[in-house]
Image (tube, grey):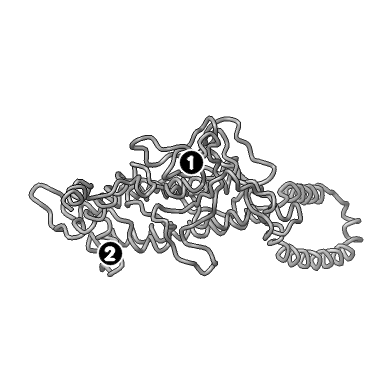
Amino acid sequence: METINEYIEQLPIDDEPEVFGLNNNANITLQQKLVREFMEPLIGIQPRTSSSGGKSPDEIVLDIKYDIDKLFLDIDYLDKTRANPKSILVNPEEEEEEKKDEEEKKEGEENKEEDEEEKKKREEEEKKKKEEEEEKKKKKKKKNKDDEKKKKSPLGNFLLQECDKFNNLIKVIKTSLHSLEMAVKGTEVMSPVIEKVYHSFLDNQVPKLWADAAYLSLKPLTSWTKDLILRIKFMSAWLYDGPQNSFWISAFFFPQGFNTAVLQTYARKTLEPIDKLTFRTNVLNKKFGDEGIYYPDDGVNIHGLQLEGASWDFDRIVLKEQAPGELHIEMPVVWLEPINVSKLQKIGYYECPLYKTSKRAGELSTTGHSTNFVMYFYLKCDDDTPEKDAEHWIRRGTALLTQLDN
């Protein structure tokens, strides 16, 4: 009995991550989580009065407000009326040809010179023609309005919806920043909502007013704001310059909608039922920014994913173990190739979930999708190490994230 007690006393108080099939780096993640949970309440109860020689809370809040204003100097609302036809329409070439034809007709009509006698004779005929043309134009306008939705591509519709969400967020931010400045300076009454924004700035947290109008994120205020600017710039490039060779999937409010739009585009092209389609996730040997990344004939290229719980062999294009201290790694560009479900190969691949945040938990939204889970990626396992199969990476807790917490 004494021997058993001695053995038990020699056991560590906390089990090593390997006991649960996790990598040793899981200890680092756990420690970061504990520190974050410990610091959050401390930050919340810290005194708001200024110390001798330090800045007052009002000065700190205004400094943060002015810093955010500087970031938004080059940022404006996404103007859908200036959208590139290639980003919105199914056949932008036909639309451009129609516009050219109409312009040529107008120029031809303006350049016609008629004698006074001919004009008098044709006055009555022109009136009749004008009336008929006006009726035709009215009918054509009605038809164009009815066909407007049909002309837009699935990705075009998705882009316009995302632009509306970003414009709403920009409006909320600019309006609240103005009200905050007026309230701090005493020219406006500080409402309970603006007061919460005030305290969030002091805690370097995203105000609830902004978070409710924004996408899911766990970033603090400083990095959240910079990340938002990058998202808006990407959306501007897509809206004004045309479809991108690789899409930053992390930039979207609703990436599930982006995936559905890609499948709809392929379904219309091949006339296959969309419920019979899925994605083959082909990981390329190129990082975003490398040369040789082109828009594929079918599907799209995406980038910006972070791999957690595993690392990636860029040469052999397979999963591998993390290096000590390596918590995340940015994945190469991935080609989302629409295929029939029957053609999807799962043997030798790890079904890796993609989440929006590291929390990996969400709620079922009204659309029927999770607020956090996006889709599954099929990542190749290493055939040279059979013990590191799909079950091995499940125990490792391997997953993809659209963004990090810092």
Q: Position of residue 137 (x, y in %)?
A: 78, 64
The numbered dot on residue 196 is: 2
Is tag 1's residue or tag 2's residue first in the polypeptide sequence?
2
Near-viewer residue (339 or 68): 339
Residue drawn at 80 percent across, 68 percent down: 135
Residue 354: tell me if it is visible. Answer: yes
Residue shown at the point (44%, 57%) measured from the top left: 215
Image x and y of residue 127, in percent:
84, 66
Q: Position of residue 192 (x, y in %)?
A: 28, 69
Residue ranking furthest to the front: 1
For label 2, the crowd category at 10 Å Cα-Cα, with few meaning under 14, some 14 to 19 and many 20 or more, is some
Q: Secondary structure at mark 1?
A: loop
- In this picture, is 192 found above or below 84? below
Count residues near mark 1 (Cα–Cα under 10 Å), then give few for <14, some for 14-19, many for 20+.
Answer: some
Q: Amino acid at mark 2?
A: Lys
> Mark 1 highlights which residue?
388
Is 390 situated left or right of 261 in this image? left
* Residue visible at 24% across and 54% down in the picture: 61
Whether residue 333 is situated above or below residue 158 in the rendered picture:
above
Q: Which mark is residue 30?
A: none
Q: Position of residue 219 (x, y in %)?
A: 35, 51
Look at 46% across and 53% down and name the residue there: 355
Secondary element under disc 2, as helix, strand or loop, is helix
Q: Check disc 1 and give the amino acid type.
A: Lys
